[in-house]
Amino acid sequence: MTELNFEHRQAGHCESGVTSNLLNYHKLSLSEPMAFGIGAGLFFSYLPFLKMQHAPVTSFRVWPGMVFSRTTKVLGIKTHIYRFRDPKASMDKLDEVLAQGFPVGLQVGTFHLPFFPPEYRMHYNMHNMVVYGKTDDFYLISDTVMEQKVRISYDDLMRVRFAKGAFAPRGRMYYPYSFPSSFDLKHAIIKGIRKTAGNMVRVPFPLIGTKGIRYLAKQMRQWPEKLGEDKASYYLGQVLRMEEEVGTAGAGFRFIYGTFLDEAGTFLKQDWIKEVAVEMGHTANYWRQFSYLGSRNCKKRSGPGQSFDELADMLMECADREEKIFRNLVKIR
């Protein structure tokens, strides 16, 4: 039996929450928003050539694993990250690391997670959680979605670690193991802000950042005519699922990022950053309004001002607001 003294804390986003909790175990107190901001987790991409559940992929976050990797790298923390071809080898390695006294972050699929409420289960393979112990044939789990610690059987854990489909986790596991004597948090904060701002306004590819939001808006205007009402509603529903149900996503990520900017402004003693944090909160509320009106459209309950054209206009407004915010932040020194 192995059970580490791991503090379970809920979080708004699984990977930044796992990153914060793993670092907290090693006595580095870093809030979830700070981990999310330093790891440059905020992002946007619309990829019509890549399908998930028969609809284009819309992402409001960076690639799975990047928040943990970026945060630990910029702070000078050494980590181990593994992927596997053999499921049994992945479980043996997990047991080995737990026995060495390290809690471990895992990337898993959510559809077969037995402790997830049924309404949370979907074919989504980018969820993250922590394993902090093992007793008999059960593993002890800290999942930031859950109020309390939970457990999972050997077979169920192996199944979700090797879930099939888009972004399959392939047994991915990761953990920090060596820490420097001191950290340059100021450098880490500024680098994280620059990275996020650059991703949102300086990438020339038209499907990324604020350009990507505008591209999605243009496509959305054409969906009813090109696809028909039913398929257009399905595509819109996919955007809304990615925005509100999958890993916090659109509005939620922006609320987290606004909190990061507020903490960063306090730490750096730059009040203008705290003012930008307020603007980010307003933008997050606007994204949430888009979600609400879009969901009414999908359910055929839309009223005046809730057509695909009006929803596209709201996306254009989101893009304009975020471009102003990140053009401001990219200048930070």
Image (cartoon, helix red, strand yellow):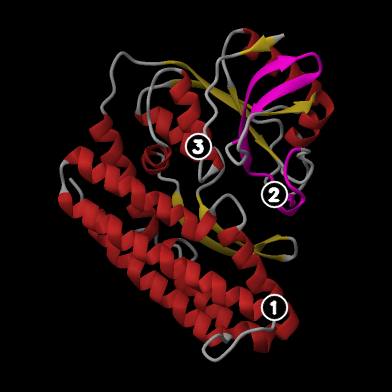
State the quadrant of the N terminus. Answer: top right
Q: Look at discs 2 and 3 and give the one toward the viewer.
A: 3
Task: Identify the amino acid type marked 3.
Answer: Gly
Q: Which residues are magenta?
A: 115-143
> In the rendered view, does 134 fall on the left or right side of 28?
right
Residue where numbered disc 2 is placed: 124
Report how many numbered discs are placed on residues in the image.
Answer: 3
Query: Residue visible at 38% across and 66% down?
Result: 283
The outermost residue toward the right is 155
Query: Residue visible at 33% across and 54% down?
Result: 197
Q: Earlier in the sequence, mark 2 or mark 1?
A: 2
Q: Quadrant of residue 137?
A: top right
Q: Secondary structure at mark 1?
A: loop
> Would you say residue 161 sits in the magenta stretch?
no
Residue where numbered disc 3 is placed: 17
State the quadrant of the C terminus. Answer: top left
Q: Is residue 168 visible?
A: yes
Determine the CA span between mark 2 and mark 1.
Answer: 23 Å
Q: Secondary structure at mark 3?
A: helix
